Image (cartoon, rainbow, N blue to C red):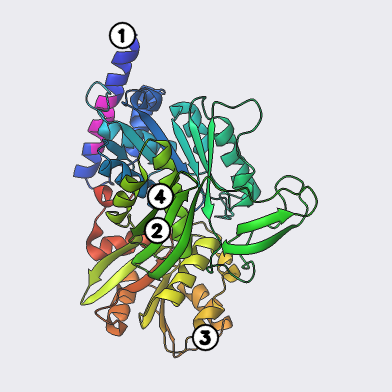
Amino acid sequence: MAGRSVRLAAAVLLGKLTGSTSRQLHLGGGTTLPGDVARMVDPQALRKLTASLGMGTVLVTGTNGKTSTAAMLRTILEGAGMRVGGNPSGSNLIFGLTAAALGLADHRGRIGLDWLVLEVDELSAPRAVLEIRPHGLVVLNAFRDQLDRSFEVDQVAQRLREATQAMPDEGFWVGNADDPRVAAMAPEGPRPKVRSILFGLEAGGAERPRLPVVSDATACPRCRAEMGFTAIFYAHCGLYRCSHCHFQRPAPDVLARDICARDLDHLELTLAAEPDWSVPAQVRLGGVFSAANVVAAAAAANAMGVSPDQIADGLSNFQPAFGRFQVKPWRGAQIRLMLAKNPSGLEENLGAVLDLDRSPVIALALNDLVADGRDVSWIWDVEMERISRDRTVKVVVSGRRAHELALRLGYAGVSGEQLLVRPKAESALDAVAELADPEIPVPALVTYTAMLEWHRLLGGGTGSSGAPERSSR
């Protein structure tokens, strides 16, 4: 026992020293490298660190929405009087999780908090569950991401399923009833000690008439037959039923209804776990897809002992997470950073902007670095044609693949008069500022490394501000 304690203490000391040195020398934000060093000294560092928590750890995973959902859950718990930590930097691979825990620990490796709420990369989720043995796991969705890293969505879903199956007894699992692949992961059979909680949206006028092009779950996850949808909320999430095996969308345990997205800063909805409770809530986000993240955070918080009124109060105090609806000033204009790293993300964010926003200009930035995914062909699966229907809006395109993005927009019918190509981020920001209404934030839909660059230029800095040292996909 003493030997293990000495080993952990050495891992903590060297990890913390690495982090401070990295920041002092401007080598990065210290969000992953300390984890690398600590795990070299003690491979069990993450398990030992999280074992010292007063209550436990909750992991939030899925293709889209991890950062916002984890941040909302932390805000709710803090408002309820709990001591909470996490990885708001976004470093969500195993080394980043270790670094986050390390940063919260004292010299003996003790974390003096009740909970850790960590977002975790979907491909790293099984390993994180096995190491941390969390109290709870939240699975948001299984969408297509970077094909040169995540491969097909079925493989992403399989990793999420493995994480779910690895959950320890006495814990809880929160999953998306509206996503067929996630709903099919609900723990079954001889695992009654793992509490299963499904969340979802209620049909009420916000549905779409058809599946979007980016939909990836038209086949039944159990028998592979074609599924029919009677309502579509976002991407491939909605009300569904398989005509062959009759697998269908289960009734959510916690749902969001009366959803009203007035603009990109105001989302109103009612959260309910019928017949037990119902509470109105407001949050500073926009878009129907954001309602799914809200209800996921609410379902997890309720499973952790937070009352409905405390959930609503916490949501009202939530501030958008790093690069997710954040607004920053630039030379008289306001820029709203919106991460759009894959087909579903860009499709939903673009739809929200065109439906809810009044800015005379929008910005798009496309990079192809490792953290973004080298293959950018996914932009052809997004319905860019909607932009061409609004002939008054200007579009500034930027990034390493700005010209490919401009080509896609040209094929979508966006006229040359509407389009400005500015590959360099600072030049793009200047062009946006010239076209902007000073009173209305300009939506900037950007891929991952573009978001880091824009955030830095907008005064966000690096490291503690949220920029991880390497991919946090």
| Foreground residue among 219 and 242 | 242
> Residue 423, how many percent across, how many down?
40, 73
Outermost residue on the front side: it is 275
Residue type at tag 2: Thr
Dot 2 falls on a residue whose secondary structure is helix
Residue type at tag 4: Thr
Q: Earlier in the sequence, mark 1 or mark 3?
A: 1
Dot 3 falls on a residue whose secondary structure is loop
**C-alpha span from label 2 to label 1:** 43 Å
Q: Earlier in the sequence, mark 1 or mark 4?
A: 1
> Residue 313, how many percent across, how many down?
29, 51
Image point 23% across, 72% down: which residue? 330
Residue bearing the label numbered 3? 389
Q: Which mark is residue 69?
A: 4
Q: Is residue 311 left or right of residue 140?
A: left
Magenta-drawn segment: 12-19
Q: Is residue 90 something that shows in the picture?
A: no
Residue bearing the label numbered 1? 2
